[in-house]
Amino acid sequence: MSESIQKQIEEIEAEMARTQKNKATNYHLGTLKAKLAKLRSELINGPGGKSAGTKNAERGFDVTKSGDTRIGLVGFPSVGKSTLLTTLTGTRSEAAAYEFTTLTCIPGTMKYKGARIQVLDLPGIIEGAAEGKGRGRQVISTARTCNLILIVLDSAKPLTHKKIIEQELFSFGIRINQVPPNVKIIKKESGGIGYQEMVPQTKGMNSEVCRMVLKEFKISCAEIILREDITVDQFIDVIEGNRAYIPVLYVFNKIDALTIEELDILDQMPNYVPISSQHQWNLEELMEEIWDRCNMMRIYTKPRGQIPDYDEPVILHSERNPTVEEFCNRIHRTLIDQFSHAWVWGKSAKHQPQRCGKEHRLMDEDVVQIVKKAG
């Protein structure tokens, strides 16, 4: 079964490679992309499979989520993932000069700026991992649960390794360093397809391509609203609805084997950090990048009549500044029901302290004292 699907995928990819990209072929390419997405979904999840990690797909490694955030180390065998885990967390992960030393997922925990960060050392993946080669599905299924993925690369090896890993993650529904497209799909009982563009579409989307893609996914009645300029691939991602949008950092290990000129060339790449886990070079920059990419903020608690607890901050994840309500929910879900007001010290307060309601937006290293309702 999987061989015939794989053959169909290869045929469609070959046809897409042969087809010139212009306005006349837009419709045809859109059809091919929709068919390709459906076949890849079937290959991973079994016939009619909807979400990654179910049906025939192997489950990820059973690792209990702990700490404030979770990051996964993904890469080819023998690039130094186990050494990096040992250096960052102190957890002993078997490291040797041969490939596939790590055969299961090894978790470790490190502390940085008061936050407990869980680091997962995943087994090395190989080309074809998304189809299940070398326990690849289990590795990538576990990677989907992470807040941040570190793609560890050997800086002495060719950069094509980076492209191969990106393609494997893409095939399994992980969209790296992207945000979900601002597209609204409202399914209806009747009335056909309604199509609205809030902004001009310059990347290949139009009403004809939209109808054809929806037909491929057996959707005959829906309202489509495009609020940003998107590609056909992004539109298919929204229809499938099972994509994971995860930030990725490229960690180039073993830089002790490179010259300054080679490092200058690598420095032109975005989202990259050069390190040497064996010699512990540049690990501080790596930690700072992890902190920034996970959008972590420290909020200190202050019990009434006592000094603030600076040892155990409450860690919040937020691209924009979190509110006092989010802070309360992070401590306990029932706390907001008894909430009266909060006293806030720090950068977000206009004066020290400031009496605030639950809508007040907090900033990094603020001190908060929650006052409950009387009675």
Image (cartoon, helix red, strand yellow):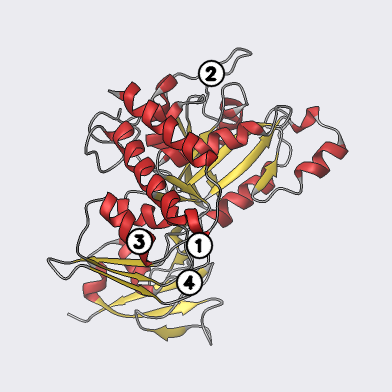
Q: Nearer the viewer, mark 4 or mark 3?
A: 3
- Mark 3 belongs to which amino acid? Cys
Residue 245 rendering spot, x and y as whole percentages: 44, 52
> What's the residue type where badge 2 is placed?
Glu
Mark pair 3, 2: CA separation: 50 Å
- The reply to whether callout 2 and callout 4 are in contact (CB within 8 Å) is no
Task: Work out whether residue 20 or residue 101 is closer to the camera in this orientation and state it.
Answer: 20
Q: Nearer the viewer, residue 263 or 343?
A: 263
**Which SS class for mark 4?**
loop
Question: Tag 1: residue type?
Answer: Met
Give the Cα separation between the discs numbered 4 and 3.
Answer: 36 Å
User: What residue would you read off at disc 4?
Assistant: 321
- Considering only order in the chain, which callout, 1 or 3, is on the residue closer to the N terminus? 3
For marks 2 and 4 on the same chain, the one whose residue lies earlier in the sequence: 2
Q: Earlier in the sequence, mark 4 or mark 1?
A: 1
Please provide percent x and percent y for residue 59.
30, 30
Q: Is residue 125 above or below residue 98?
A: below
